[in-house]
Image (spheres, rainbow, N blue to C red):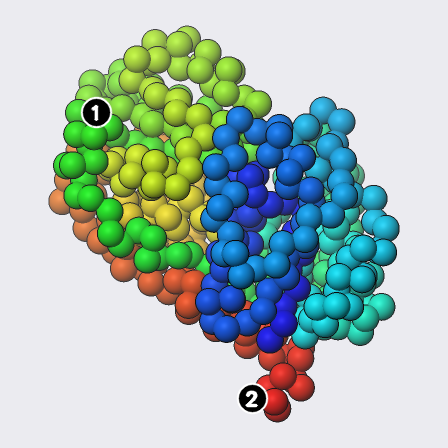
């Protein structure tokens, strides 16, 4: 097939959508499809970020088309686009896609939707998250604003021929807002092979100077990730005499505030903030740790959870969003009530004090990730494409 992928966010930005888009595009060309990827002007984004070494992660067989865009005021790393239609229309006409698959719903996404209608090309949308919960980043954390965003999201996805979402919780929200096209629950693709040939844990711990049992959190340091609760929970452990460390991987506007919190709780010497990590550095640092922990209530199917599971780490999460669809309580990790640092601390203590339990949950976690492997997931994507493009099936 000839598949055009649209996304408002892309490398060198680091987030779950970007990783899903890259894995999808790379996996589709590896399976023999032709892929064109339309996104913002990544060269402008690269200039805003201190580390953009991850640009090489995209398979060179994918035709990348960066489109003119401008930075949002106050968010220099986020690009937005005024829809012009002209250039992407010409490029799409030349590419002649069998299907257009869009992974976001922002400015470029609406352009993709209009172009799909103009060119009479089947249009598939991927719905990745509870977007209304992120309005706080723009100082719009009001019920009426959230309701408006949910209705706008529903209207957008009603224009699709099919919708793919990685969690039943998101599917239920779309159905509740009367999205009428078919909605398929399909996991985000994970390159499981990337995690299969790493050095032994003791080698990695020696390399990174890890001498204590270590919890790890990976993600953007923003309000919605509730990293402050993880730090508070870890402080409970320290006060209880637990000899452990906490590794926080990622960056964001709350980093200084979170570092100040660790100092105020007198645990700064036990909490390490690494900033953003990529590639093997990221994989090895996570693999060297013992337990992955998150207090976020807005996760749908966070790839950082799946990647930690693929590395054999048990996970601790909260009963919110789609977390319970892949973190199974007392099987591959523990799930606790949200917004409760003491409950989180109890789960952390239970795992760190029982090495056999921790190892068993880790084995189960690694085994579970096989179902999320890109080859398995992309077969499901192809089936969705077949549903919206039946002529492709008859040509096989």
| Res. 233 in view | no
User: 379 and 396: which one is in front?
Assistant: 396
* Residue labelled with disc 2: 396
What SS does tag 2 mark?
loop
Task: Give how far across and how far down residue 290 sits, in percent.
Answer: 24, 37
Task: Give how far across and how far down residue 149 sits, in percent.
Answer: 75, 45
User: 200 and 160: which one is in front?
Assistant: 200
Quadrant of res 155: bottom right
Residue 104 relative to residue 280: left or right: right
Residue 366 relative to residue 158: left or right: left
User: 269 and 28: which one is in front?
Assistant: 28
Q: Residue at position x 30%, y 32% from top?
A: 215
Q: Nearer the viewer, mark 1 or mark 2?
A: 2
Q: Is residue 155 above or below residue 385?
A: above
Q: Residues within 10 Å of mark 2 (few under 14, many from 20)?
A: few
CA–CA distance between discs 1 and 2? 54 Å
| Screen quadrant of the C terminus | bottom right
Q: Is residue 90 above or below residue 388?
A: above
* Residue labelled with disc 1: 209
Task: Give how far across and how far down residue 375 sits, in percent.
Answer: 42, 68
Of callouts 1 and 2, which one flags the residue occurring earlier in the amino acid sequence?
1
Q: Residue at position x 81%, y 71% from top?
A: 119
| Screen quadrant of the N terminus | bottom right
What SS does tag 1 mark?
loop
Q: Are marks 1 and 2 in contact (CB under 8 Å)?
A: no
Q: Residue at position x 56%, y 33% from top?
A: 224
Q: Residue at position x 34%, y 41% from top?
A: 280
Q: How many marks?
A: 2
């Amino acid at each position: 097939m000839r598949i055009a992928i649209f996304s408002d966010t892309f490398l060198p930005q680091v987030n779950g959508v970007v990783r899903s888009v890259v894995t999808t595009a790379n996996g589709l060309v590896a399976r023999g499809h032709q892929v064109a990827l339309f996104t913002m002007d990544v060269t402008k984004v690269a200039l805003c970020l201190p580390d953009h070494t991850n640009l090489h992660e995209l398979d060179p067989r994918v035709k990348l088309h960066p489109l003119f865009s401008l930075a949002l005021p106050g968010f220099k790393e986020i690009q937005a686009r005024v829809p012009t239609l002209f250039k992407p229309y010409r490029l799409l006409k030349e590419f002649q896609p069998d299907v257009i698959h869009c992974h976001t719903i922002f400015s470029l996404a609406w352009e993709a939707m209009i172009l799909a209608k103009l060119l009479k090309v089947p249009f598939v949308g991927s719905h990745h998250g509870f977007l209304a919960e992120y309005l706080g980043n723009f100082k719009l954390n009001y019920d009426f604003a959230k309701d408006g965003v949910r209705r706008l999201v529903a209207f957008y996805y009603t224009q699709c021929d099919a919708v793919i979402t990685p969690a039943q919780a998101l599917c239920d929200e779309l159905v509740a807002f009367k999205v009428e096209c078919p909605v398929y629950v399909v996991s985000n693709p994970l390159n499981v092979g990337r995690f299969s040939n790493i050095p032994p844990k003791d080698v990695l711990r020696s390399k990174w100077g890890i001498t204590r049992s270590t919890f790890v959190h990976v993600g953007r340091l923003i309000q919605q990730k509730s990293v402050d609760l993880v730090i508070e929970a870890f402080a409970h452990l320290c006060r209880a005499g637990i000899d452990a460390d906490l590794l926080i991987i990622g960056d964001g506007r709350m980093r200084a505030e979170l570092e100040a919190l660790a100092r105020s709780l007198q645990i700064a010497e036990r909490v390490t903030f690494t900033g953003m990590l990529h590639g093997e550095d990221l994989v090895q640092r996570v693999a060297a740790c013992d337990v992955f922990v998150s207090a976020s209530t807005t996760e749908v199917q966070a790839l950082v959870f799946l990647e930690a599971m693929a590395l054999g780490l048990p996970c601790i999460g909260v009963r919110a969003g789609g977390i319970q669809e892949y973190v199974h309580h007392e099987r591959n990790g523990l799930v606790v009530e949200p917004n409760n640092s003491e409950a989180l601390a109890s789960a952390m203590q239970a795992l760190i004090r029982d090495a056999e339990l921790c190892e068993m949950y880790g084995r189960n976690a690694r085994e579970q990730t096989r179902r999320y492997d890109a080859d398995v997931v992309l077969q499901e994507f192809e089936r969705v494409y077949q549903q919206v493009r039946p002529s492709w099936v008859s040509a096989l």
